[in-house]
Amino acid sequence: MKNKKLDTICVQGAYSPKSGEARVCPVVKSTTFYYEKAQPMADLFDLKSDGYFYSRIGNPTVNAFEEKLLMLDGGTGAIACASGMSATMLAVLNVCNAGDNIVSASAVYGGTYNLFSVTLKKYGIETRFFDPDDTAENIEKLIDEHTKVIFAETVANPTIVVLDFDKIAGIAKKHGILFMVDNTLVTPVLCKPKDFGANVVLYSSSKYLDGHAVALGGAIVDCGNFDFASSNRYPEFNTPDDSYHGLVYSTLGEKAFGTKCRVQMMRDLGAIMSPENAFLTNLGMETLALRMERHSYNASRVAEFLANHEKVEWVKYGSLESDPYHALAKKYMPGGQGGMLSFGVKGGSDAATVVMEGMKMIAIVTHVADVRSCVLHPASTTHRQLSKADLENIGIADNLIRLSVGIENVDDIIADLDGALSQI
Ligand SMILES: *Cc1c(COP(=O)(O)O)cnc(C)c1O
């Protein structure tokens, strides 16, 4: 699979059977793995060889998913997780302890916002949010010697803010801080964050990677481009880990972050993806490149339709020339911006409800980024736990409808929207 194109990797990457073996990567439903002798197992524990011993640390089906994602994103290691949330949690805890802080864009997924602002805070990890449109100078003011992560989403869910990679990666690099990017809504098909300075890439594979709304999962990709050995900011990477017989992670060079995350974080927190979900996600990823192309095309057509509709107050989607993030979208996602957009109808929250209930094909569900078009009103559902002030902080208006444009025929999607809008 070396030197193959991205769409080929989606279909055939990371699994090549030997003669007589299953053509499709099978589900290996075994928690544990057999060894004839004791030494090979000891070598695995010592990281002297590669292999499986317990499915919390590694499993062949899960590994096939990890390796495929790694081929797509580039980097030195990928770790599959039970969900997108657990991926974010494990990645952050891999570098943050009590007393440390995260500097994060305020435009992030609601669950991530809660994790950062409420749950991690209870464990002594503080998050300082910045407005993604703010200047580098102002954002830098949030950084101190305890800042361990700078966090942002490539395209933010649900505000559709496009990440200014150069600005944020520049800050991270200048201060020697790990730059983590949640790339869920565009996938490596449309944007590879590593190419624009990210050090760690995160996914909720429950979205486009699976693509069919059947398997919860997440992933952490170590881009392998952060130099822990010459940094004073991450003493944990430069001192022996007593829980792993004195291993100093920075001595592993470009594999430091990913190895620590697997052998320490996954070992102790155990939020690994199940083999069944890895199987389904692998299956979904076979059509990922094709789907992202169609999602992007359909969404750009829908965005144009909405932008010209008299009942629509505003539309956010990167392909629109009127969109404030148009230039960034073109720069970082020239091949398309994915299927997620948001729009506001005239008439506030009540009108939003009328439109959503008026749709016949587009379903109201708490999910996005699968083959079926769907909508959600974040202010009354996914973001219900947030206060009015929080909602304003992260840019969610009360008339905002999050629309995940599927891969149905775009004329049918537009007709459904048109019918629903006419009911206001
Ligand atoms: C859904 C989502 C998550 C959380 O993923 P789960 O798999 O639902 O835990 C994180 N980030 C983004 C951008 C998401 O859309």
Image (spheres, grey):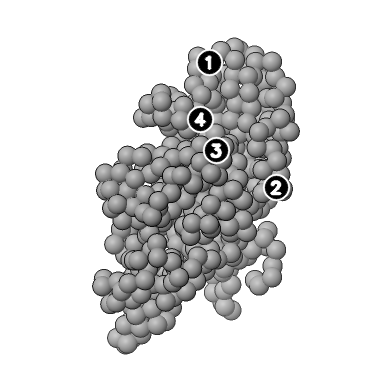
Q: Given this view, does label 3 or label 1 mark the residue nearer the observer?
A: 3
Query: In the drawing, does residue 280 fall left or right of residue 251?
Result: right
Figure check: 20 above or below 231? below
Looking at the image, can residue 130 be seen? yes
User: Where, by quadrant of the figure, is residue 269 drawn?
Assistant: bottom left
Q: Given this view, does label 3 or label 4 mark the residue nearer the observer?
A: 3
Q: How far across and down, in percent of the image, does residue 260 sit?
A: 38, 67
Task: Count numbered badges in the picture.
Answer: 4
Figure check: 204 above or below 407? below
Q: How far across and down, in percent of the image, does residue 343 sit?
A: 60, 26
Q: Given this view, does label 1 or label 4 mark the residue nearer the observer?
A: 4
Q: Given this view, does label 1 or label 2 mark the residue nearer the observer?
A: 2
User: Cβ–Cβ below 8 Å for labels 3 and 2?
Assistant: no
The residue drawn where x is 32% and y is 39% is 118
Question: Hey, what amino acid is under mark 3?
Answer: Asp
Q: Earlier in the sequence, mark 2 or mark 4?
A: 2
**Which residue is more in the foreground, 65 or 250?**
250
The kind of secondary structure element at disc 3 is loop
**Which residue is more in the foreground, 209 or 117?**
117
Q: Earlier in the sequence, mark 3 or mark 2?
A: 3
Q: Residues within 10 Å of mark 2 (few under 14, many from 20)?
A: few
Which residue matches tag 2?
331
Which residue matches tag 4?
395
- In the image, which disc is placed on residue 348? 1
Q: Earlier in the sequence, mark 1 or mark 4?
A: 1
The kind of secondary structure element at disc 1 is helix
User: Cβ–Cβ below 8 Å for labels 1 and 4?
Assistant: no
The residue drawn where x is 38% and y is 55% is 145
Which residue matches tag 3?
134
Q: Earlier in the sequence, mark 1 or mark 2?
A: 2
Query: In the drawing, does residue 107 fall left or right of residue 289?
Result: left
Query: What whole-number distance in Å separates the C-alpha atoms at marks 3 and 2?
Result: 19 Å
